[in-house]
Image (cartoon, rainbow, N blue to C red):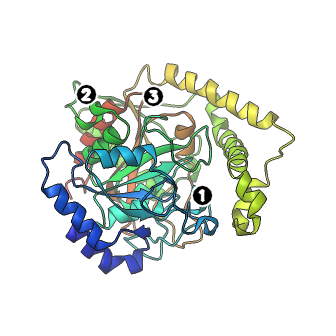
Amino acid sequence: MRSYLDRIAAREAVIGAWAWLEEPGMVISAARSADSLEPTGPLHGRAIGVKDVIDTAAMPTAYGSTIYAGHRPACDAACVASLRAAGAIILGKTTTTEFAAIHPGKTVNPHDPARTPGGSSSGSAAAVADGMVWGALGTQTAGSVIRPASFCGVVGYKPTFGTISRAGMKPLSEFTDTIGVFARSVAAAGWLVATAGDRPELSRLGPLAANPRIGLCRTPYWEQAEAAAREALSTAAERLRAAGAVLSDVVLPAPCDGLAEAGMAILIREARQGLAHELLNARDLVSEELRELLARDDPGNPAPYDAARRLVVECRGLVEDAVFSRYDAILTLSAPGEAPVGLALTGSPVFNHLWTLLHLPCVNVPGLSGPSGMPIGVQLVGARGGDAALLSIAEWLGQLLPDGER
């Protein structure tokens, strides 16, 4: 625990990963207490960061907004309570974009402070990548776990929708909000979700029973991928094929071409509804970027929203029947490329949002880099509820990539 505190003391002024930190004396006291007890599981005494849109009773939760500066929730979110019950030590609250939306926080990329760490789980990804904490909770509404994990070079795991209870989380979009995790290994990510979501099978990654069948999916948005991302995907595919995986190209059913537009229609309407209190009572304290985004929704015309939901539900069935009846996992991009230079934007979620809408489990597998030396991950996507099998494939792939051992 002292090593984490020392790292934070040395680096936080540059990285800005934390919205609030527990007093060092309290942290060391909790670590001593953990030392005195017999461990009951893999999270005993582990240092965990919690994204600041997830409630903590003993720590402020500001949701990335000045509206809630100093706010103390009445109780821990369900996932935080589960981690505490397992012996984890909550080190603090990690920086988020405003309400987990688009306006960035103070965090920079630990590999290059001139670049974005991604959003909205920026602080969680950067803290884990910089060695400030063992693991961290994040959330994903569009691409807010997988994209920052790729930009920062860590494992990001967004489980099947609903695996971890959202009780005590500030909602942005009820249709897609998913609590996920960041860690330095696939196994550690599995332990975190196993504990937070009461899924013990995710804490035991088994060997692959057979060479996996993997569909190489470039998605309908391939033209938005940079050369470095395309090369990373090609490298991962080559390594998998050489190791015995059965790879073939997969094209998503035609209706999936409309998921990007549908996803934005759903997100904007549900975010406007979810932030109704703030827009009514503290509108001037909501960023101009977010107000402009939410103004694109017409409250008097629910037809586009209803049509978007119907399309997503249709695509879920089509993908399940056409894709996961043939493949054990999909290999695709985690992000368009390396983390962009500049801190005003957090990068595009175009290679993430469709999978989040489909409620599928996703893992960013690090181990590759681009021409600037910045991390680039690749994304594995599994069938709904097929998280254990997906993690086993992700663990295998991580060992095959050039920087996997490091």
Q: Could you tell me which secondary element the residue under label 2 belongs to?
A: loop
Q: Earlier in the sequence, mark 2 or mark 3?
A: 2
Residue wearing tag 3: 384
Residue 73, horizontal then vertical, whole percent: 52, 56
For the residue pair 33 and 343, the one nearer the viewer reads as 33
User: Of the residues tagged 1 and 3, which is closer to the observer?
Assistant: 1
| Residue receiving disc 1 | 99
Answer above or below: position of 318 versus 174: above
Q: Quadrant of residue 286?
A: bottom right
Tag 2 residue: 211
Residue 74 visible to an observer of this rendering: yes
Left or right: 61 in relation to 309: left
C-alpha distance separating marks 2 and 3? 20 Å
Callout 3 amino acid:
Arg
Q: Does the CB distance between marks 2 and 1 fall below 8 Å?
A: no
Q: Amino acid at mark 2?
A: Asn
Q: Which of 300/61 is in front?
A: 61
Instruction: Answer left or right for 349 relative to 298.
Output: left
User: Nearer the viewer's eye, disc 2 or disc 1?
Assistant: 1
Residue 288 in picture, x, y percent from top left: 73, 67
Q: Secondary structure at mark 1?
A: helix
Quadrant housing residue 384 = top left
Front of the two marks 2 and 3: 3
Q: Earlier in the sequence, mark 1 or mark 3?
A: 1
